[in-house]
Image (tube, rainbow, N blue to C red):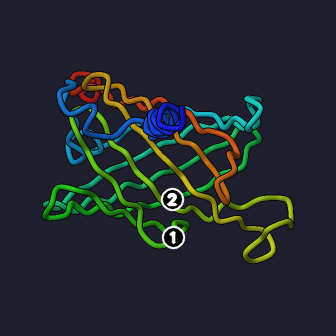
Amino acid sequence: MRTLLICCLVVLLVGCAGPQVNDYASEQPRLELSDYFNGDLQAWGMFQNRSGKVVKRFHVAMTGTWSGDVGVLDERFTYSDGSTERRVWTLKKQADGSWRGTADDVQGEAVGQVAGNALHWRYKLRLKVDDSTYVVDDSTYVVDFDDWMFLMDGQVMLNRARMSKWGIDLGQVTLSFYKPAAAEKSE
């Protein structure tokens, strides 16, 4: 009986591990960050709190530029309440194929891996909030992002990110990226 209980616990824990980026290695189309995040893109997104309520909607206008394995992604956010924000990522491909990213509001580096059509990022984001509980400097939380992006075709990428603090789920961000086709750009 004890052995059966231990086996059940092991199976349960392994099942809770969640997907790994290599689970998507054979998925198409293959995601090349320097191709997809090159030029002008648009994204539309929302933040849902842990109960699922949409508490913030936004649009992002982005421009990506590359020099070899280093890219700069300039993101300009406009929120549904009219407020704006800007984040400029510097993305660097590593010798082992992984990715590192930095931005002013990212604590340390984002670490990511691409396989097939998927990118999995993990990073800590300094998030401005209106509440003074658990703050770093009067108005900032440092939250953990577990960020997944999936290339659907040459133009559309879907993104879902889980936000947490001390292992407690705070909510999720959902985005839909759109990259105009070459024909659309020339019109």
Return the x and y of residue 146 as percentages of the image width and height.
Answer: 50, 48
Q: In the figure, 85 relative to 181: above or below?
A: below
Front-most of residues 164 and 64: 164
Q: In terms of image quadrants, where is residue 132?
A: bottom right
Q: Residue furthest front?
A: 1
The kind of secondary structure element at disc 1 is: loop
From the image, tell me which residue sits under label 2: 87
Amino acid under label 2?
Arg
Front-most of residues 102 and 40: 102
The residues bearing labels 1 and 2 have C-alpha atoms spaced at a distance of 7 Å
Return the x and y of residue 105 as percentages of the image width and height.
Answer: 55, 67
The kind of secondary structure element at disc 2 is: strand
User: Residue sitting at 25 percent across and 26 percent down?
Assistant: 154
Q: Are marks 1 and 2 in contact (CB under 8 Å)?
A: yes
Amino acid under label 1?
Asp
Where's the N terminus, which quadrant?
top right
Around disc 2, counting alpha carbons within 10 Å, would you say few (fewer than 14), some (14 to 19), or many (20 or more)? Answer: some
Q: In terms of image quadrants, where is residue 7?
A: top left
Around disc 1, counting alpha carbons within 10 Å, would you say few (fewer than 14), some (14 to 19), or many (20 or more)? Answer: few
From the image, tell me which residue sits under label 1: 104
Where's the C terminus, which quadrant?
top left
User: Residue sitting at 64 percent across and 54 percent down?
Assistant: 167
